[in-house]
Amino acid sequence: MSLLSEYMKKEQLLKQLSEELQQLEQDQRLTSELEFKEKLETLMKEYDKTPAAVIELLDPKPASRSASSSQASTGGRRKRKLKIYKNPNTGEVVETRGGNQKTLKAWKDQHGNDTVESWLVRVED
């Protein structure tokens, strides 16, 4: 791209952005929000408060809310223990934190649940 065409493209973009900026400046909602922000900052200075202090004052327990919501999303479950099984027939070892492991399920189908559970070598955290 030539320098001239790049310049013209940027000039057009600048013109478009200027028009959008003028439209925003004439929007009553923006004027209202800017006025609110200015008054809030003046009030914060008058009472020597930081934005964090104002947030803490208006919403005193945001940490507990986020912790409870993250716990709710994970179900609040503890990590399952690692179970290690060793098939005495083949010597194959399976490490799993749940009973839905493919090889373990196949062993249980073939040999029965009680037999496979007797192959449990150890349990780790």
Image (cartoon, rainbow, N blue to C red):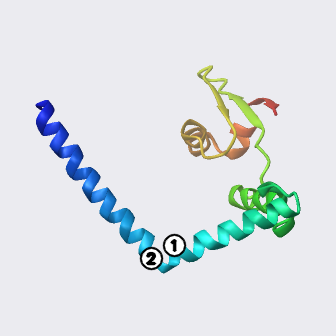
Q: CA distance from mark 1 to mark 2?
A: 6 Å
Q: Residue 42's x, y, as percent?
A: 76, 65
Residue 88 lies left or right of residue 47; in this view the side is: left
In the rendered image, the residue lying farthest to the top is 91
Residue 53 lies left or right of residue 11; in this view the side is: right
In the rendered image, the residue lying farthest to the bottom is 28
Number of marks drawn: 2
Pick whichever, 7 or 98, lies toward us: 7
> What's the residue at 60%, 23% (across, down)?
92
- The amino acid on which the numbered mark 1 sits, given as a three-letter code, is Leu
Q: Which mark is residue 27?
A: 2
Q: Residue 110's x, y, as percent?
A: 56, 41
Which quadrant of the structure image shows residue 119?
top right
Residue 33 lies left or right of residue 18; in this view the side is: right
> What's the residue at 12%, 32% (across, down)?
1
- The local secondary structure at tag 1 comes to helix
How crowded pointer 1 is (Cα within 10 Å; few <14, some 14-19, many 20+) is rated as few
> What's the residue at 87%, 57% (across, down)?
48
Residue labelled with disc 1: 30
Quadrant the C terminus occupies: top right
Q: Is residue 78 above or below residue 76?
A: above
Pick whichever, 14 or 111, lies toward us: 14
